Image (spheres, rainbow, N blue to C red):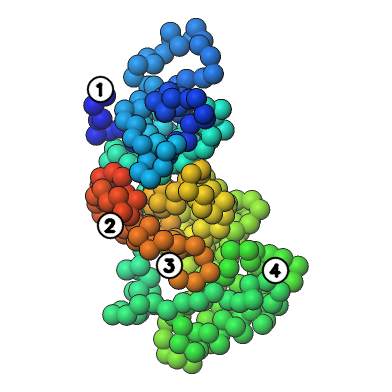
């Protein structure tokens, strides 16, 4: 009987209840654990407006083609979450519920973030339009590639690969996710040789070229140091990996906006929770969180090549990143209408 409010944060979970557990009971348990409830009744509940702050499981539907899975729609009061904080949002939505005894498996399939909460996030600063302006390339797709082999090259040979690729017609090269600062090639050496390759290729072709320099590191201090150095030697774009965590991603997005740099995000590690169809988090939810965080690019997958990808699902990922307004499209995995509140596109 709950009437969903425009300011509610909505989440769709795919629930596989344990044998003997009613799906409605399982949905209610997930709603409670991800908001105000705990494993037992406590007297301090009387000190809280639980009727307001408790999440509501307002709809439970069987998943077509299955006999043990259910879609649970859950509404959360917007005031449950700190403004502009992915860390706080995810601590509630995916904090403890995935280990709940009442469910055999649980997957977060989609979310609707309300306008009021979206406006507390900065979103992408630039996107592809500014990148095209900086590369002075219009009217055609941008052509890029990743340096291979991704591990083992010396800094000088790495820079040579960058030069040869750009000289041969690419618009940009990029570091791979696990190139950081290993004994065979320290980060500063890589940055210098990469930019030498970029500048030589630009001089030889008369075109603007680029290379995504991975500033992922062990600490935020190290990431700042590498990003500042990359900025000082003339690159216009840096990249980070998803595995650095939500707080680090938001922090680097703020740095990139202040430094007028483009920030690319590699989705390293996403398949550990996105690939299983009945447990984890659907990548479209990660796409929404990353657009909110403020990265300009995200590695969102393709339907060809070595990595798994369903054509309609991948299309849904890109629509999530690029459209200003989302409409329900079950074939693409979009379960909610959602206005992006003027947050820029994430490519």
* CB contact under 8 Å: marks 2 and 3: no
- Please tell me the numbered disc located at residue 303: 3
Q: Which residue is mark 4?
A: 186
Q: Which mark is residue 323?
A: 2
* Cα gap from disc 4 to disc 3, whole angstroms: 34 Å
Disc number at residue 1? Answer: 1
- Of label 2 and label 3, which has the lower sequence position? 3
Specify few, some or many for label 1: CA neighbours under 10 Å numbering under 14, 14-19, or 20 or more: few
Of mark 4 and mark 3, the one earlier in the sequence is 4
Name the outermost residue toward the right: 183
Q: Nearer the viewer, residue 343 or 202?
A: 343
Residue 180 image point, x, y percent = 65, 64
Comes first in the chain, label 2 or label 1: 1
Which of labels 2 and 4 is toward the front?
A: 2
In the picture, residue 79 is in which quadrant?
A: top left
Measure how far apart labels 2 and 4 are at the Cα level. Answer: 39 Å
Left or right position of 252 against 139: right
Residue drawn at (50%, 84%) of the image: 166
Of callouts 3 and 1, the N-terminal one: 1
């Amino acid at each position: 009987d709950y009437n969903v409010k425009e300011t509610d944060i909505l989440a769709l979970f795919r629930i596989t209840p344990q044998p003997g557990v009613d799906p409605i009971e399982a949905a209610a348990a997930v709603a409670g654990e991800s908001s105000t409830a705990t494993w037992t009744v406590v007297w301090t509940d009387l000190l809280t407006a639980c009727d307001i702050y408790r999440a509501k499981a307002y709809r439970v539907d069987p998943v077509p083609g299955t006999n043990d899975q259910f879609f649970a729609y859950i509404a959360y009061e917007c005031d449950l979450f700190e403004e502009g904080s992915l860390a706080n949002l995810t601590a509630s939505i995916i904090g403890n519920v995935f280990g709940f005894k009442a469910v055999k498996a649980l997957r977060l399939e989609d979310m609707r973030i309300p306008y009021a909460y979206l406006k507390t996030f900065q979103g992408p600063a630039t996107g592809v339009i500014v990148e095209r302006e900086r590369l002075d390339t219009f009217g055609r797709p941008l052509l890029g590639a990743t340096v291979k082999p991704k591990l083992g090259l010396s800094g000088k040979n790495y820079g040579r690969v960058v030069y040869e690729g750009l000289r041969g017609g690419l618009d940009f090269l990029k570091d791979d996710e696990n190139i950081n600062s290993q004994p065979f090639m320290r980060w500063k050496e890589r940055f210098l040789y990469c930019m030498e390759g970029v500048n030589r290729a630009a001089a030889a072709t008369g075109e603007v070229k680029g290379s995504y320099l991975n500033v992922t590191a062990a600490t935020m201090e190290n990431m700042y140091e590498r990003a500042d150095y990359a900025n000082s030697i003339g690159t216009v774009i840096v990249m980070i990996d998803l595995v650095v965590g939500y707080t680090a991603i938001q922090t680097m997005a703020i740095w990139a906006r202040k430094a007028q740099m483009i920030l690319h995000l590699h989705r390293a590690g996403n398949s550990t929770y996105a690939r299983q169809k009945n447990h984890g988090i659907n990548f479209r939810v990660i796409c929404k969180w990353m657009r909110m965080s403020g990265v300009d690019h995200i590695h969102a997958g393709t339907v060809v090549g070595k990595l798994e990808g369903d054509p309609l699902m991948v299309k849904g990922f890109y629509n999530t990143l690029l459209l200003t307004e989302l409409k329900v499209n079950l074939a693409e995995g979009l379960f909610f209408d959602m206005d992006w509140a003027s947050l820029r596109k994430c490519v």
